Structures are given as C-alpha cells and as structure tokens.
Image (spheres, rainbow, N blue to C red):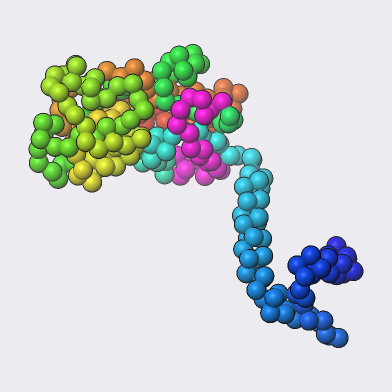
Amino acid sequence: MTQSAVSQHVRSLETSLGVDLFIRRPRGLSLTDDGRKLLPQVGSALETLTAATRAFETVPTENVLTIASSVSVAQWIISPHLPEFTRSHPEIRLRFLSTIWPDDFHTIRADIEIPFGSQKQVGRDAVMLEPNGLIALKSPNIEGTIETLPLIESVGTSDGWKTWGAVVGGNPKPEIFADTYGAALHLAVHGNGVALVSKILAQHAIQTGQLMLAHAATAPCKEGYYLRVNEANATAKQFRDWLLEKINIGSD
C-alpha cells in the first residue's frame, strides 16, 4: 500500500473509533494514549493471524516421505528404530501425520499408512502387522498380579479386559482408562498397574525392560494395526520393507 492509502485507512479507523490514535508531527508520528491502549490487542490479533497462516505454508515435497499413523505407533514401534533408518538414508526427510481410526485416513494423503481397526474397516489392500493379540503388562518395579494390581483399560476397542476374562478366566475389572494403547503402555511403564495392550505395540517396551508380562496368556483381538503403502513410491516400499524387518526381528 502507498503511504497515502495507509493514511486514509488510519483516518477511517480513527473516525470509526471516535478518537485520535496518533499525534502527527512534522518529522513523524507518535501514539496517543488511546493508541497505546489499542496497540496490545492489535498486536495480539496480528500474532494470532500470523500463527494461523503458518499452517498453510507449503511443506517441502522433495525427498519427503509422509507417514500416517497413530501417535502410539510412531512412539512405540517406529521411533525406537528410526535412528537406524535416518542414518542409512540421510537424503530422505520424514513427515509424520497423527491419525487414529480408519476414517481418518480418508481425509489425508500419505505414502505410508498404518491404520488401526478390523480388516473390513481398513480395506483389503492393507496387510495386518503381526504379532496381533492382547497381552497383560506391568512394570518390573512393582509387585503384584492381575488379581491384585489396578487394571488399565484402553477404551474404544472391541476387545479388552472383558475379553481377557472370557478367554483366560476370572472377572477382571479395570480401574484406569486410557483412550489409546500407547497411553495405557505409558501408564504401565510408570507403575500405575497392569495394561492390556496390542502385542506388537509392546515389543520394544518388553525388549528394553520397561515392561514385563503380568501373565503368559494372549487374548484374541478383532482389530489390529495394518500397513499399506503407495506402491508407485519406491522410497515408501523401502521404508515398508525396513519396518517389517524390524518388527519381525522384535517378534522372534
């Protein structure tokens, strides 16, 4: 905008507010008391607008591999092994998108997708990640059993402690509820009780001694984690093969 256009806008604003915002001097401007009163709110509003527009900044696409998964998968399956992949492939940049349910994947476009749900929900082009099933885990730092410790339930799934009771026996009643398996794992790591979680998600926590089995049984689960990739993307297939290798090694 030209200087004259800015001056006209300022005059219009002063007329609308009914006050002078600037003291006009031969060699410049200074704020009036009313101008100083308005400045903090205007500054805050501009900062909010700036922050909002950053969400629309163009994300680089060259050598960027987009991975859509739940935070639980990113934290407990991918992240522990990722330094190895990034060291071997420094030319590849990674972008993670957080999703949870199969419907979330309909609104995004990713090179690699790891949805959670049933085979019917995720589609036939997705392959289930193994091992599947639910296992009971607790911190090695606490004493007790499933019968004596608080039980942690991951809500929003078809199977849980009720399924465990039907298969293994007993009448387990959860006392702590989390909305993801990852959160349930985190609670168990910190000694809050016994978490019933997806077997594949718990591999790293068990291998590193953060958690141990509270019972030897595995309960069935109607849902699981699935993997599908953009077959036209060679980098995506490369990441898929690497991830499956890491998962298979962990399940040995």
Query: Which quadrant, please, contains the C terminus?
Result: top left
- Which x, y percent locates residue 56? 66, 46
Residue 8, given in percent of the width and then of the height, sits at: 87, 67
Q: Residue at x 46, y 44 (%)?
A: 87
The residue at the point 83 percent across, 65 percent down is 12
81 falls in the magenta region:
no
Residue 114, compared with residue 27, is above or below; it is: above
| Residue found at the far front of this picture | 18
Visible in this render: residue 6?
A: no
Vertical arrangement, residue 117 with respect to residue 8, above or below: above
Is any atom of residue 166 visible in this view? yes
- 204 displayed left or right of 28: left
Classify the position of the N terminus by image quarter.
bottom right
Number of marks present in the image shown: 0
Q: State the image quarter where residue 159 is shown.
A: top left
| Whole-percent x, y for residue 11 in the image | 84, 69
* Figure check: 104 above or below 39: above
Q: Residue at x 43, y 34 (%)?
A: 70
Q: Is residue 135 left or right of residue 71?
A: left
18 or 239, nearer to the observer: 18
Residue range highlighted in magenta: 85-106
